[in-house]
Image (spheres, rainbow, N blue to C red):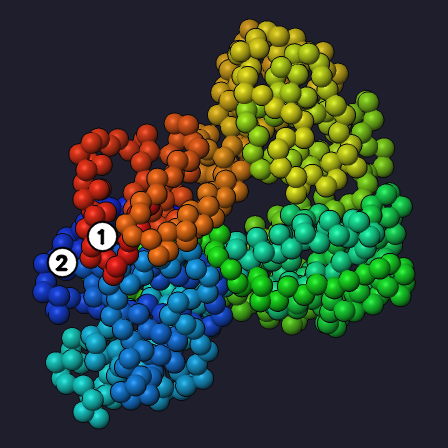
Amino acid sequence: LPLVRHTLHLRQFPPAAHPQIPAVTSAVTDALRMLPLHERPALAVFTSGGDSQGMNSAIRAVVRMGLYCGFRVYLIYEGYEGMIGDGEDGQEMIKEANWGLVSGIIQLGGTVIGSARSARFRTREGRLQAARNLIRRGITNLVVIGGDGSLTGADLFRQEWPSLVDELLKEGAVTEKQRRDYASLHIAGMVGSIDNDFCGTDMTIGTDSALHRIIEACDAIATTAQSHQRAFVMEVMGRHCGYLALVSALCCEADFLFIPEEPPGTDWPDVMCNHLIKARQRGKRLNIIIAAEGAIDTEGNAISANLIRDTISQKLKYDTRVTVLGHVQRGGAPSAFDRLLGCRMAAEAVLALLDARQNPELPSIVVSLDANQCVARTKAVNEAIQAKNYAQSVELRGKSFINNLATYRTLKKLHSPANACSDSCPTLLIVMVGAPACGANACVRAFVRTGISNGFRVLGVNGGFDGLVKASFRPLSWESVSGLTSSGGSCLGTKRITAEEVGIAAVAEALSKVENLRGMLLIGGFEAFSSLVQLFQARPSQPALAVPMLVVPCTISNNVPGTDFSIGADTALNEITQIIDKIKQSAVGTQRRVFVVETMGGYCGYLATLAGLAGGADAAYIKEDKFDLAVLLDDVRHLKQKMHDDCGLQRGL
């Protein structure tokens, strides 16, 4: 997860170093640790605005990374309201944290320190009271987890800070020494929002978990809709942003999509109904329509889920139901991705505050996930939608949104283009190699339909390279790949046999017999990668291999060189994380119980490492990071000490 820092002033901050242990043990950190505890700088973390899954992971990481780096760390409860407080009672909303206080929260949804939208903080009087409460504890470093409104409010607070401190000095609320010691406020932000509506990052904390809720609901509804030949209208969150609706429509093969960035024309009832009629004529027994809660037409008229239902019922007489997912999308345990994202962003935010100690002139920053946009775009999108400049709103959302939208448009079509898939068309092959992984079939569907749209005939190979040399081909049509997105396993069959094992010459001969062959796609893990290398190296002696070939990495082990992420790894990681949650829950009430979890991965420690991080494990052992008996003994001693001292925590993982 490559992280980038951006300023809240729209100026891109240089990419940050990866938060590895050697990088953290800098001269700054060592100097802080040498200070007596009461003299160390203080850092506080709070959540603001709407909650999202993964916030607790970020809170936990801020506390532990802050303590590791030598800060005193505080938790501010109830967001900006807790920071302002009410006299003496308000002070209790800012509490010092220790390592054990944040144990056992990584798997919890919502935010354990509470969140609230504060009208008082929008006033200078409120910010003055907040400054008073922070200075009393020596807090001049803030980590804020929230949406763009929360981050903007924090940056305003930073800009006003010197004048606020001067005003407190005049009132006698702070001393001259405090004014000098706490002259600057440093801000580091993380975006927590299920809508993914912040244009400074490719993914916000909570979005992935919300998508899981939507997709699970769509998959469940599809079975009952199939049974009764029903149409279902799914309303998802997204008042000003259609990201959740778009991606869930892409993942669930939705028949129709309504999002604010690309609204349909005022004739949408006829267009939608004609599409549904054709789908039923082609034998489809169910229809899924996904609408963002902020859906509109090109004239700005609202399109509600109930309006869509009534239109279908009246025009087509279909049995049509509405499901409004609402706050279910915000709830529940966070996905593995959101836990990891919260951990990584939080660690980076603490490092950013360390940098700010060296250079007080640095502006407020927000930690982003591999983004190339800026904060101004978030507001510009809404302005473009209000101005009915929908093309610009899509463009402002960024490349990921544009690509998702283009892919959905292609894949949702009911049939292939005219005169497609004739025997005279150039041919593409799909070969699955290695163990099956979730998402492989979705890849097949997308490749087939995109290939057909571009004038190719697509053949599937049954059973990997073994099936290729036996010329076991299967024509793949537009209709034949319908419904594959949600299915696991391998629709074509797969084997772990590489090209070299079945014989390079045999593979070359089989390919030479494929009429008008223009390319071959290998879907798989390290075996697929190795086969591609073998076939490429054999080209000089086997001219039939001189056709375009590529690999789509697809393995739960995530061990394919040249890519950060493989299809199937995320699903496997989620399964492991959910099982770890259940294991930890089973230990509640028991005394001194240690669980050892073994994961798959062969020689690759990706699953074990990330599952350890997402599951809050005490240790993770992998082949790449050599360990011996001394390391194990040291970890056991640490585990024993934790069970005695760490807030009564009697569990090890």
| Label 1 sits on residue | 642
Q: Which class describes the residues within 10 Å of circle 1: few (<14), some (14-19), or many (20+)?
A: some
Q: Residue at x 58, y 67 (%)?
A: 327
In this picture, residue 361 sits left or right of residue 484: left
Gap between marks 1 and 2 measured at Cα: 21 Å
Q: Secondary structure at mark 1?
A: helix
Whole-percent x and y of residue 359?
22, 63
Mark 2 highlights which residue?
A: 33
Is residue 359 at all visible to an observer of this figure?
no
Mark 2 nearby-residue class (10 Å; few <14, some 14–19, many ≥20): some
Q: Disc number at residue 23? A: none
Q: Nearer the viewer, mark 1 or mark 2?
A: 1
Q: Is residue 570 left or right of residue 285?
A: left
- Say left or right for 54 vs 230: left
Judging depth in this view, the residue of 342 and 410 nearest the camera is 342
Residue at the image position 82 percent from the left and 45 percent from the top: 284
